[in-house]
C-alpha cells in the first residue's frame, strides 16, 4: 500500500506548518488558554480565511473542499505538532460529522457557518453515569406541541465555553442503554449567558482546554432542532465518534513527533561528565525504543485512516487498534521524554510538560485503551 502524500496534500501540510510556525507560539497559546477567553479567535479566523482548513474535509455543497480522511490526518497531525487548543476536532470532525450525516436544511446552514469560521460546535453526549459509552443516554426529550422539552445532565462537554452551537444526545424512546431511541438536537449556545432551563459549570482541563458540565431542566427547543430521524441517531454518532477517534490519534502522532525530536535535541545539547548525555548507550537505547513506539503508532493510525470508509465492524476494529496502540505509545514516549529531561520535564516553561499533558488526555478521550481493547476483542470473536 502506498502511504505517500499527493502534491496537494504535501502543500496542505506545508501551508499549515508554515502558518503555525509563524503565528502559533506555545507561550502565547498557553497564556490565551488560561485567560478568560480561553483561545485565540484570530487563529480560528486564519484557519477559515487563510488556510481554509475548516472546510478542507467538508463537502463542496456547503462551500467545503471535499477532502477525505487523508486530508484530515494531515491537518490534525500538524495541529498536534503545534499543540493547538482551538476546537478543530470538536467543530469540524464531531460537529460537522454529525450535521452532515443527519442532513436537513438547518444542518446544511450550520455546516456553511463552520466553513466560514462563524460556527463552533460542542457535542453534549457523556453523562454522569454513562462513562464513555455514547448510547448510554438517560437525558430525555419529549414532544410538547410543535417543539421539544429536554431534561438531563451532560458532563465533560469539551469546547462548550467556546461554542456557538450545541449538539445534544437525548433519549426519545427505548431503555437507557438501547442504541435505538437516541436522538440528536441542535441548539444555539452561549455558555456565558445560558438560556432558561440550562445551567452551565465551566472549567479548564489538564491539557489547557476548556469544558463544561451542563444541566437541562425543562429546556424548550423548537421543532426543527431535531437532527435527522427521531430515535435513529446512533449510526451517525457511531461513525462520527470513530472518525473523531482517528483524528485525535493522528493529533497524538504530531505531538509525539515533536516530543521525540525535542528529546533527541536535548540529549545532544545537555552535557554531563564532559560529554553529551546522548552519547550514553543506555539513553540511546531509550530513545530508539521511543522511536519504535512512534513508528508502530503511525502504522496503526494509517490503517485506521484507510479504514474509515470500510464497513462498520472493520472500521471499528481498526480504530480501536489504533487507539490502543496510540495509548501505549503516548504513555511510553511521554513518560520517557519527561524523565530524560529531568525535573524540567514537568515545568510550565518547557514544552515537554504541556505535550505530555495533552498525550495523557488523548489516552482517555473517546474511550480509554482498556475500553477499546475490549471492543476490539468483541469484534474479533
Image: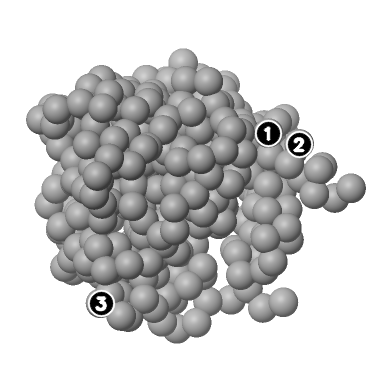
Label 2 Cα crowd, 10 Å radius (few <14 / some 14-19 / many 20+): few
Label disc, if present, on residue 371 of the rendered structure: 1
Is residue 369 among what the camera can see? yes
Pick whichever, 272 or 242, lies toward us.
Answer: 242
Left or right of 78 in this view: 42: left
Residue at 29 percent across and 62 percent down: it is 107
Left or right of 159 in this view: 252: right
Q: Quadrant of residue 39?
A: top left
Percent x, y of residue 100? 39, 65
Pick whichever, 56 or 188, lies toward us.
Answer: 188
Percent x, y of residue 247? 49, 53
Percent x, y of residue 116? 18, 65
Q: Give the distance between the C-alpha atoms of the residues marked 3 and 1, in whole angstroms.
A: 37 Å
Q: Earlier in the sequence, mark 3 or mark 1?
A: 3
Percent x, y of residue 98? 41, 56
Q: Are marks 1 and 2 in contact (CB under 8 Å)?
A: yes
Q: Give the distance between the C-alpha atoms of the residues marked 1 and 2, in whole angstroms.
A: 5 Å
Dot 2: element: helix
Residue at 33 percent across and 52 percent down: it is 226
Amino acid at each position: 500500500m502506498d502511504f505517500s502524500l499527493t502534491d496537494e496534500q504535501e502543500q496542505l501540510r506545508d501551508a499549515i506548518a508554515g502558518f503555525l510556525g509563524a503565528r502559533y507560539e506555545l507561550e502565547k497559546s498557553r497564556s490565551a488558554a488560561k485567560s478568560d477567553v480561553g483561545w485565540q479567535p484570530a487563529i480560528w479566523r486564519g484557519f477559515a480565511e487563510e488556510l481554509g482548513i475548516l472546510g478542507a474535509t467538508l463537502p463542496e455543497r456547503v462551500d467545503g473542499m471535499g477532502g477525505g480522511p487523508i486530508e484530515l490526518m494531515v491537518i490534525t497531525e500538524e495541529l498536534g505538532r503545534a499543540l493547538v487548543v482551538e476546537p478543530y476536532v470538536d467543530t469540524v470532525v464531531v460537529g460537522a460529522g454529525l450535521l452532515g450525516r443527519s442532513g436537513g436544511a438547518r444542518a446544511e446552514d450550520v455546516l456553511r457557518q463552520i466553513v466560514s469560521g462563524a460556527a463552533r460546535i460542542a457535542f453534549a453526549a457523556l453523562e454522569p453515569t454513562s462513562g464513555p459509552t455514547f448510547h448510554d443516554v438517560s437525558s430525555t426529550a419529549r414532544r410538547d406541541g410543535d417543539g421539544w422539552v429536554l431534561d438531563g445532565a451532560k458532563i465533560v462537554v469539551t469546547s462548550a465555553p467556546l461554542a456557538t452551537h450545541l449538539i445534544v444526545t437525548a433519549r426519545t424512546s427505548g431503555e437507557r442503554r438501547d442504541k435505538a431511541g437516541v436522538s440528536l438536537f441542535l441548539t444555539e449556545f452561549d455558555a456565558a449567558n445560558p438560556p432558561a432551563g440550562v445551567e452551565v459549570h465551566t472549567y479548564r482541563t489538564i491539557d489547557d482546554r476548556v469544558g463544561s458540565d451542563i444541566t437541562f431542566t425543562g429546556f424548550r427547543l423548537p421543532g426543527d432542532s431535531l437532527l435527522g430521524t427521531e430515535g435513529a441517531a446512533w449510526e451517525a454518532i457511531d461513525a462520527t465518534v470513530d472518525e473523531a477517534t482517528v483524528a485525535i490519534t493522528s493529533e497524538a502522532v504530531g505531538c509525539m513527533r515533536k516530543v521525540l525530536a525535542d528529546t533527541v535535541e536535548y540529549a545532544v545539547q545537555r552535557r554531563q561528565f564532559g560529554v553529551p548525555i546522548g552519547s550514553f548507550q543506555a539513553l540511546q537505547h531509550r530513545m530508539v525504543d521511543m522511536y519504535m513506539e512512534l513508528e508502530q503508532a503511525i502504522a496503526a493510525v494509517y490503517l485506521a485512516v484507510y479504514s474509515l470508509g470500510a464497513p462498520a465492524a472493520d472500521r471499528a476494529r481498526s480504530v480501536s487498534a489504533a487507539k490502543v496502540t496510540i495509548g501505549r505509545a503516548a504513555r511510553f514516549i511521554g513518560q520517557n521524554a519527561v524523565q530524560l529531561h529531568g525535573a524540567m520535564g514537568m515545568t510550565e516553561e518547557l514544552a515537554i510538560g504541556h505535550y505530555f499533558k495533552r498525550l495523557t488526555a488523548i489516552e482517555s478521550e473517546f474511550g480509554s485503551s482498556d475500553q477499546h481493547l475490549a471492543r476490539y476483542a468483541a469484534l474479533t470473536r
